Amino acid sequence: MTAPGRARAAQLLRERVLICDGAMGTMLHAAGAALDRSLPELNLSDPGLVSTIHESYLIAGADLIQTNTFGANRLWLGDHGFPDKVDEINRAGVRIAREAQDRCEREVLVAGSVSPAATALQRRRVGSAERAEVIREQITALVAGRGVDVLVLETFGYLDELAEAVAVAAEVSDVPVIAQATFADDAHTLGGETPREVATVLSGLPVAMLGTNCTIGPQRMLAVAEDLVRYASVPVSAQPNAGQPRRTGLRSFEFSIDGGYFARYLSRFAEAGVSLVGGCCGTTPTHIRAAAEAVRPRPQEARPGPAAVPAATARTPRKDHAERAVPGPLADQLARGQFVVAAAIAPPAAGRDDQAAQAAAALRAQGVGVFAVQPPEVTRTHSDALDMALHLQQQAGMETIATLATWDKTIMTLQAELLGAHALGIRSVICTTGNPPVLGDYPAVDGIWEVDSIRLIALLAGLNAGRDSDGLALTGRTSFCVGARIDPGARHPEAEIARARAKVEAGAHFLAVQPVYELEPLRRVAAGLAGRVPLLLSVNPLRSFAEADYLAHEVPDVTIPPAVLRALEQAGPGARAVGLDLAADLLREARSLVNGVIIAVAEDEPGLPGPLLAALS
């Protein structure tokens, strides 16, 4: 079909809900493209593959396809040896998309994909003037001749850079501009801007639409999109990722969100007033087809913002448990066969360590004797888990378990940290491989991956035996109580149990079991390990249907039973109390299968909730 033209493109962006395509990179990687190669260069070396992906999204129902030109600028291409091919690669990307558009019998748009000028690693050495020139060069190529219908400035983590790019686009061409910022889990951009700030600034610029894409999945992005709609004076777009990636190899990841869940949330985006919905990393034609079927019947109309949901009332801990005796160190409790009651604490934002100490003191008054310091789930600046454990132990005299991840450290660094921590009194460690953060304060961070959790366990076992990482004798021995993790909800349970056995053989003294929301996976783990090592069950009460829905669909290897989802959804504002009761019931049934619990405590609760205290009685 003939291209609609720029005026018609601007009209389409205003008159109805449009379906954008999904991830190009995900599809190219699935087809065999290496993770470290330049994907835009495939416009020259394998145009047939790029065309096939465009057509698959059009067949799925996309109204707008984006050119394979994300990162096709002088700086990004220069890292791959193609700095002089900006014009050629971008024009080829437009031509391939236009040819797919011509073969489609529906009215569809071609959008030119434009990334930030500099990669995260390049940003500090690239000034504003150079960024503008880099963006100008790419946009000029995208709009040349029979250029794109729309420009999409996407995945911008800094509002100033996005505003610069919008200004450049307006100078170069009259092509309608969609300006999309990316937000982390805390609903802030990398630059720290809120959705309201982004919407306010972009609404005052020459954009046809503003929005958000990448980094987060549908549920977290819905809240961001609702705020953008609330404060924007132009239409809004949203393209979430397919949840969180699961690491499947040294440099390979996969996403697990199904099309039904994705479509359900994109339908909610449309209900919230979003005008263009699509997908980013991890999304495929399957997701877009499901979204198109769910969203397309909707006419675009003014919709009210989401109604506020009354907050559930936190339960007050039972007073008759407030004077419990505090047990001894973790290793002694495990040796005596005593049921361990620990609380999970995440390091707070940098400079707020005293808040964690105060929360721990309140929990200790309820009988909690051990505090498992876990890596925080936020991607902002924060204290290290090992440092936080040392702070609690030295300043407040609390028994701690430090969670130590290996992805970002060499074995020599780990060894030095462990010997120093032992000298300062740390005795308990949970070993995990971990993953780099998704964007956040340090978006360029990648892993070292020299050591995995099993090798860290072996290192600790060697230190306990008086040997260093090379097997050389030390002047003394450490006395670490070594823990590791096991996930009952893993996609391949037998493989997970086999890996847990390997951790035990390497020297693990106990296993911290990831949270479960039904008993059968825990029974399977307990049977598979046959009492070879103590199990500490992590308990994370569900506090809302939204949280449960997010965990069930966007977080790898978490299973929430349908009955639990229904109970929380039906409870409405009372979901928090229902979630606590469900956790307490599960805890009572699980006591015979485990040797202790590690309870996650909400930030707005002064201590352990009453139902959990009752279950521990």
Image (cartoon, grey):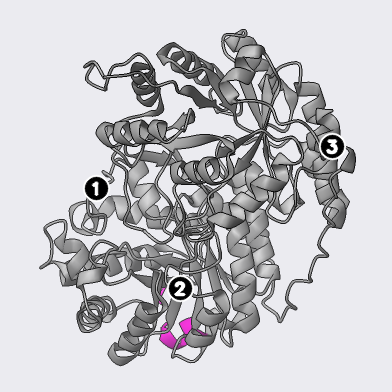
The C terminus sits in image quarter: top right
Separation of disc 1 and disc 2 at Cα? 25 Å
Residue 8 part of the magenta segment = yes
Compare marks 1 and 2 and give the one earlier in the sequence.
1
Instruction: Say what amino acid the circle numbered 3 marks.
Output: His
Q: Is residue 384 above or below residue 124?
A: above
- Going 62% across and 61% down the picture, which residue do you hit? 266
Residue 18, horizontal then vertical, whole percent: 56, 70
Residue 458 picture quarter: top left
- As helix, strand or loop, the secondary structure at mark 1 comes to loop
Is residue 563 something that shows in the picture?
no
Q: Is 186 displayed left or right of 432 in the figure?
A: right
Numbered tag placed on residue 321 in the rendering: 3
Q: Are marks 1 and 3 in contact (CB under 8 Å)?
A: no
Q: Check disc 2 and report the residue beneath it.
A: 180
Q: Nearer the viewer, residue 473 or 233?
A: 473
Separation of disc 3 and disc 2 at Cα? 51 Å
- Going 64% across and 44% down the picture, which residue do you hit? 551
Q: Is residue 68 above or below residue 536?
A: below
Q: Nearer the viewer, mark 1 or mark 3?
A: 3
- Going 58% across and 39% down the picture, which residue do you hit? 397
Q: Check disc 1 and report the residue beneath it.
A: 36
Instruction: Say what amino acid the circle numbered 2 marks.
Output: Gln
Q: Find the magenta span and give its range.
A: 1-10
Compare marks 3 and 2 and give the one earlier in the sequence.
2
